[in-house]
């Protein structure tokens, strides 16, 4: 379990402890009762342990402790033990409660907190006054209490957290008062043990609740199955019959009359074939004509205007001479089974949320229409539709609202259906569309645009105002060799192109898209081998303090030495790495390589490493950073991570936690390309950012110089107010350098100082920097 999931469970436990939830599911009360019962079972054992441990403490501190304080503490412990043990004895003969309120959890939490406070008093009051041997005993005792108590209370997480937290706090306070040389180490060790206990409690509590729910669900299903079996036994639908050679009834059991809708009347003389509908009746005639036994032959009949299904099993009767006398058999009313089977078939072919054909059924329909179009030479198109910003709806408003939105979208699609159009849902927010028998391809494109416009309208769902967009990719057929899978793939590629084009549009597939996709696939396969094949490289660009005229750091720039394509820049392969999940191992390699290179540079020159927003989806990013620093022995304050504003758009919580952890380690945070994104001032005050990197487009871009000057001055003003450092990117000439210096920038980087340097060239650049740039920077600073 990750620390973030543990914190979520702790927060949920606190919310459940803090207040009662009105109209909560009955299952929650049963879970609480089971949690309390699980803890109460061990009350005699835990109270015995408290009593024994109290006796040990009294023995250890009897000479150093104030007798009145020790007596009061001992009596309080005895009282808690006595009250708890008595309550257990009174409850043991009673039937276990089936439900418990949130107040019962709060009482258990207060009880645990009280007991923890009593035991926390031991190290606080007496740890520093006893001998080293007695301190060791008390330390072992308290540590054992933390671990044992935490696990004993594991099914009630709020009680366990309160118990462990209070006892741990008292222990830490006692350790800090001793002045022992190992106090920091011991404190960290104690906190680590406590954190392990807290994580174990969170995990155990979750598993307990999940197991309880699973057992309750299993029991409920068992009861349903038992009920169905009893119903079947009491209302069996089998009957016996005998007919003449023409399958006219000669005799039958009473049950046959009941299922035929003529209870109490005779069916003698009625031909069963005539009771069946045309299709199933024909199958029965063929079976009769063969005069061979048949089994489980299903026929559909009409009973009182209602369609019913019977299953017939019969064998022919012959006399000694082989003369056919008739038939004898058994029948069953299988209507319920048939309806259930049809429902299962419907469910297997239908998206249950929207009622549209699901992916499998959509593919079947597409195959049928494609074959018809190929046979008749008619037109055919397949389209993929994807909602834009749908994930944000789920994340912010919840999945029920997201489901309601999907149903609303499916209704919109249904209103646009005509004779030649079929919609289906692939899953999530992905839909498919089939169009056939159209005159012009432009008609399909126009339909797609109408669909996008219809879906993109604003709507209110459960009081929430929601606006999402839509993008579509269209593939036309049939080609000579096109299969359904080919067309779905082509429509998907066109959909990706539509999204890359700004979303909210419809794109038509062409062969170039396939070639580009194939090239990306091949590049992805090559990228998988790049790490193992030692093909990745780091180049460095210096970052200069333009006031002091000194090198303050180098930005690490990733390159790929492809064996066939040559040296590739990040733009050619980083997006592929982000999509394929390869960004995590590549990012780990970059961090490690950059830190190892920087460790050889003179202090305090830093190395700046770009962190992709895709890396923040990995729980191991923080460990990669820590490992890179540990392996390289690079001080944390010499590592600077560069992030972009895109990081905050979809991963705000994860980003905040990571950046806070980075600052705790001493790592510097720089916001790259500032001014080109959303540039929200909230990011600057909410997150521990220390540097703003001004994008090169404002330093030497095509924009009017006055406009660029206004932007740079504004950014510098913000940085000065917030105490940030500013770095101007793209400084290519001495004039650029003088310009950004006059505007108040602190640092600069760009081709004016150096193009990208290999790791081997960095030491030489550092050594020759003063000779090459020192006078120029100094004179500009003086000016």
Image: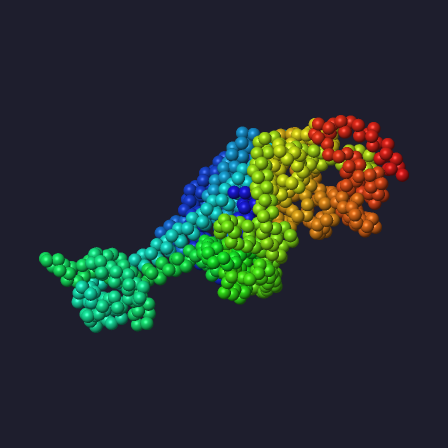
Residue 322 horizontal side relative to residue 167, left or right? left
Tell me the residue at 64%/42% (across/down): 612
Residue that sits furthest to the right in the current view: 783
Residue 379 is situated, as x and y percent measured from the top left of the image, at: 52, 58
Snapshot quadrant of residue 468: bottom right
Image colouring? rainbow
Residue 159 horizontal side relative to residue 694, left or right? left
Residue that sits furthest to the left in the current view: 320
Tell me the residue at 37%/53% (across/down): 219
**Does residue 392 appear in the picture of this structure?**
no
Tell me the residue at 55%/48% (across/down): 8
Vertical position of residue 298 compared to residue 771: above or below:
below
Residue 400 horizontal side relative to residue 536, left or right? left
Residue 239 is situated, as x and y percent measured from the top left of the image, at: 22, 63
Tell me the residue at 60%/44% (across/down): 516
Snapshot quadrant of residue 743: top right
Vertical position of residue 758 compared to residue 719: above or below:
above
Closer to the camera, 715 or 363? Answer: 363
Residue 197 is situated, as x and y percent measured from the top left of the image, at: 51, 41
Residue 386 is situated, as x and y percent measured from the top left of the image, at: 56, 55
Closer to the camera, 525 or 8? Answer: 525
**Does residue 641 appear in the picture of this structure?**
yes
Quadrant containing the C terminus in the rendered view: top right
Snapshot quadrant of residue 445: bottom right
Closer to the camera, 663 or 16? Answer: 663
């Amino acid at each position: 379990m990750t620390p973030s999931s543990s914190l979520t469970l702790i927060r949920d436990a606190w919310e459940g402890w803090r207040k009662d939830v009105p109209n909560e599911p009955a299952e929650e009360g049963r879970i609480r009762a089971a949690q309390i019962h699980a803890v109460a079972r061990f009350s005699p054992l835990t109270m015995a342990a408290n009593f024994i441990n109290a006796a040990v403490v009294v023995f250890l501190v009897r000479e150093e402790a104030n007798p009145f304080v020790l007596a009061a503490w001992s009596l309080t412990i005895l009282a808690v033990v006595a009250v708890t043990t008595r309550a257990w004895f009174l409850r043991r003969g009673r039937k276990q409660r089936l439900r418990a309120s949130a107040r019962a959890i709060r009482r258990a939490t207060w009880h645990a907190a009280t007991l923890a406070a009593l035991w926390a008093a031991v190290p606080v009051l007496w740890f520093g006054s006893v001998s080293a041997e007695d301190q060791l005993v008390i330390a072992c005792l308290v540590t054992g209490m933390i671990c044992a108590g935490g696990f004993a209370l594991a099914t009630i997480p709020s009680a366990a957290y309160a118990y462990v937290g209070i006892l741990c706090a008292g222990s830490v306070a006692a350790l800090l008062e001793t002045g022992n040389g190992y106090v920091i180490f011991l404190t960290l060790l104690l906190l680590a043990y406590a954190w392990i206990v807290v994580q174990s409690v969170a995990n155990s509590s979750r598993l307990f609740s999940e197991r309880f729910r699973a057992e309750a669900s299993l029991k409920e299903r068992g009861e349903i199955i038992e009920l169905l079996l009893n119903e079947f036994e009491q209302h069996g639908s089998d009957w016996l019959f005998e007919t003449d050679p023409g399958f006219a009834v000669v005799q039958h059991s009473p049950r046959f009359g009941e299922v035929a809708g003529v209870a109490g009347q005779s069916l003698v003389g009625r031909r069963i074939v005539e009771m069946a509908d045309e299709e199933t009746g024909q199958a029965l005639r063929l079976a009769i004509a063969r005069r061979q036994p048949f089994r489980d032959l299903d026929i559909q009949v009409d009973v009182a205007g209602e369609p019913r299904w019977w299953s017939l099993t019969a064998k022919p009767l012959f006399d000694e001479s082989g003369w056919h006398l008739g038939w004898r058999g058994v029948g069953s009313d299988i209507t319920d089974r048939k309806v259930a089977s049809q429902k299962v078939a419907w469910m297997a072919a239908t998206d249950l949320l929207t009622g549209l054909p699901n992916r499998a059924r959509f593919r079947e329909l597409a195959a049928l229409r494609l074959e018809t179009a190929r046979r008749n030479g008619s037109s055919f198109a397949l389209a993929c539709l994807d909602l834009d910003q749908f994930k944000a709806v789920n994340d912010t408003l919840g999945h029920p609202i997201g489901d309601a939105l999907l149903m609303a979208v499916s209704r919109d699609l249904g209103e646009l259906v005509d004779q030649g159009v079929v919609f289906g849902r692939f899953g999530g927010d992905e839909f498919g569309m089939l169009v056939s028998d159209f005159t012009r391809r432009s008609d399909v494109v126009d339909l797609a645009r109408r669909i996008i416009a219809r879906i993109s309208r604003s709507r209110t769902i459960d009081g929430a105002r929601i606006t999402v967009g839509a993008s579509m990719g269209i593939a036309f057929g049939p080609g000579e060799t096109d299969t359904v899978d080919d067309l779905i793939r082509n429509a998907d590629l066109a959909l990706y192109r539509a999204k890359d084009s700004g979303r909210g549009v419809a794109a038509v597939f062409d062969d170039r898209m396939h070639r580009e996709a194939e090239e990306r696939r091949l590049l992805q396969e090559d990228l998988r081998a790049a790490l193992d094949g030692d093909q990745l490289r780091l180049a460095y660009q210096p970052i200069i303090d333009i006031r002091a005229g000194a090198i303050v750091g180098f930005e690490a720039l990733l390159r790929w030495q492809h064996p066939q394509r040559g040296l590739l820049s990040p733009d050619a392969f980083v997006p592929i790495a982000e999509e394929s999940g390869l960004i995590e191992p590549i990012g780990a390699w970059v961090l490690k390589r950059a830190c190892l290179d920087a460790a050889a540079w003179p202090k305090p020159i830093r190395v700046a490493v770009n962190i992709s927003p895709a890396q923040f989806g990995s729980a191991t990013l923080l460990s990669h950073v820590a490992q890179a620093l540990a392996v390289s022995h690079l001080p944390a304050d010499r590592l600077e991570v560069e992030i972009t504003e895109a990081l905050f758009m979809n991963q705000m919580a994860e980003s905040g936690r990571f950046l806070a952890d980075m600052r705790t380690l001493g790592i510097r945070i720089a916001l790259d390309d500032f001014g080109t994104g959303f540039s929200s001032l909230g990011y600057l005050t909410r997150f521990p950012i220390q540097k703003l990197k001004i994008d090169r487009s404002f330093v030497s871009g095509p924009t009017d110089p006055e406009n660029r000057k206004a932007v740079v001055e504004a950014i510098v003003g913000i940085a000065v107010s917030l105490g940030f450092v500013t770095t101007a990117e793209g400084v290519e000439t001495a004039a650029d350098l003088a310009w950004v210096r006059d505007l108040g920038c602190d640092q600069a980087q760009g081709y004016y100082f150096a193009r990208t340097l290999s790791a081997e060239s960095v030491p030489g650049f550092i050594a020759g920097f003063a000779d090459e740039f020192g006078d120029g920077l100094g004179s500009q600073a003086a000016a």
